Image (tube, grey):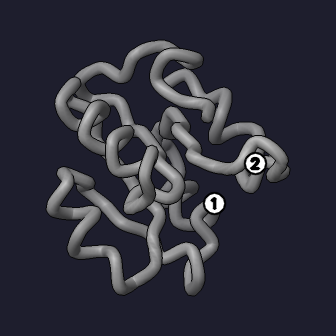
Amino acid sequence: MAGPDRHGRPQAGQRVLVHAAAGGVGHLAVQIAKSRGAHVIGTASTAKHEFVRSLGADEVIDYRDQDFAEVLRGPAGRRRPRHAEARRRDSPPASPSWSRTGSG
């Protein structure tokens, strides 16, 4: 998992992307980032959006219907989110490198 301890702890006002936000690790990452004042963006299927929002996510992206990279790029000038990803160790990264290395 690439997350808060690997890339620095989220701070108030930072944007944090959490993949699999409704999952076993993702739901914890959402709560930790939110408790530290971050703007949390989670990915989950549509059926789990309400649950992810109830955890504190400010935005939820349906990974089945939306390209999260396009959604995150948004209008020019938006800051790139920090990245927390819950995935199997043998899975290749699903994210473009900029989302893992953004400075905040």
103 left or right of 55 in image? right
Quarter of the image for residue 73 reads: bottom right
Q: List x then y, in percent, for residue 90.
A: 83, 47
Instruction: For the residues labelled 1 and 2, say whether their Cβ atoms are less than 8 Å apart.
Output: yes
Give the vertical position of 88 relative to 67 (above or below): above
SS for dot 2: loop
Which residue: 26% across, 54% down? 57
64 left or right of 82 in image? right
4 left or right of 90 in image? left
Give the vertical position of 95 relative to 69 (above or below): above
Which residue: 65% across, 34% down? 100
80 left or right of 53 in image? right
Numbered circle sitting on residue 69: 1
Nearer the observer, 62 or 25: 25
Indicate the amino acid at tag 2: Pro
Nearer the observer, 98 or 20: 20
Which residue: 33% across, 41% down? 28
Which residue: 53% across, 66% down? 71
Numbered circle sitting on residue 96: 2
